[in-house]
Image (spheres, helix red, strand yellow):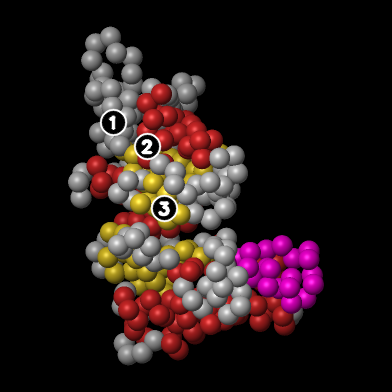
Amino acid sequence: MTAAPGGDDRPPAVDDVLVGVDVGGTKIAAALVAPDGRLLSPVREAPTPAHAGPAVMLDAVARLVVVVTGQHGDGHVPRIVPAAVGIGSAGVIDARRGTVISATEAITGWAGTDIAGGVAQRLWAAGLRGPDGAVPPVHVDNDVNAYAAGEAWIGAGKGVEAALVVAVGTGVGGAIVLNGRVHHGAHFLAGELGHMPAGLAAGERCTCGRLGHLEAVAAGPQIARRYREATGAQEVAGALAVERLATAGDRTARRVYCEAATALGQAIAGVVTVLDPARVIISGGLARSGDLWWGPLRETVRRELVGPAADGLELLPAALGTTAPIIGAAHEAALRRAGA
């Protein structure tokens, strides 16, 4: 830590401490992160004001950064200025500029938002500035990319040259890791599995408005929707409820649940055939399912692949849990700050 010049009451800079932020549809989470990926503070959370507009969203993100860096001055956290702030956000993100290219209405009006600029402006106003008067650099990426960056750095993808990370929960997302770095693609869309065409989704409307995308059958809310539509049981509100019904012997629940896993397995096999990763890492709420979901998923991937990939591909759950996007966002911000 370096002291500020005489007479300046701004908090001192910390050369290596980072802040990672995970911006989701229901909550925002943030923590201090060490250069080796360890969390240096408890994860602090706040509800996402998802439908209050972009300005209120940016206020909430900046406020949480202020809290974890101790700028609120309650004495529970030493006042520090981090080396960089990394943010993983829902939506298709231009990682060079930190802006939202497109997004669903899970966060109202999020498309077009300058997250990096808006958060930096608010941090400056809150006094989160180093001895030189500058705000720490703010780097923004898609939340699944941030998750993948964390897993590739110190999680299930550590040391692997090529990996595919798949997130299955409220939606279906994905990210590609090459040589330890997230591959964004020409339009920042690399890894967007949820919007791949899926045969089992024919006629099903995706959250993006188009027909026949994977997310329409494989995401948790869509599993519950398909069960309700097939049975009329309007009280079934989530994928976990469908899983429990299937485990208890409900044939419709078992069919819907297995179709979700099968459709995901077919999509994964398609990407694996092109990318040939050593490892596929599955995260999200459905990754906590039992063999009812993992069984058909593994069987489908193995059946669809040819050659050595059919037996040699590792398909395994993520290792870091909910802290992965916080850690990954911080790591990406540090790499960007270093010019890597």
- The circle on residue 78 is none
Q: Are marks 3 and 2 in contact (CB under 8 Å)?
A: no
Q: Which dot marks residue 101?
A: 3
The residue located at (79%, 70%) in the rendering is 233
What secondary structure is marked by label 2? helix
Measured Cα–Cα span from mark 3 to mark 2: 14 Å
Tell me what residue is drawn at x 24 percent, y 64 percent: 179
Q: Earlier in the sequence, mark 1 or mark 3?
A: 1
Q: As displayed, is residue 130 above or below residue 137?
A: above
Query: Disc 3 marks which amino acid?
Result: Ile
Closest to the observer, 296 or 212: 212
Residue topped by disc 1? 14
Position of the N terminus by quadrant: top left
Q: Position of residue 324 (x, y in %)?
A: 42, 53
Q: Which SS class for mark 3?
A: strand
Q: Decide: marks 1, 3 in contact (CB < 8 A)?
A: no
Q: Amino acid at mark 1?
A: Val
Return the x and y of residue 246 as percentages of the image width and height: 70, 76
- Tell me which numbered mark, 3 or 2, is placed earlier along the sequence: 3
Q: Residues within 10 Å of mark 3 (few under 14, many from 20)?
A: some
User: Is the stretch drawn in magenta largely helix, strand or loop?
Assistant: helix
| Amino acid type, callout 2 | Gly
What x and y, as percent, mark residue 201? 57, 77
Image check: 23 left or right of 337? right
Front tag of 1 and 3: 3
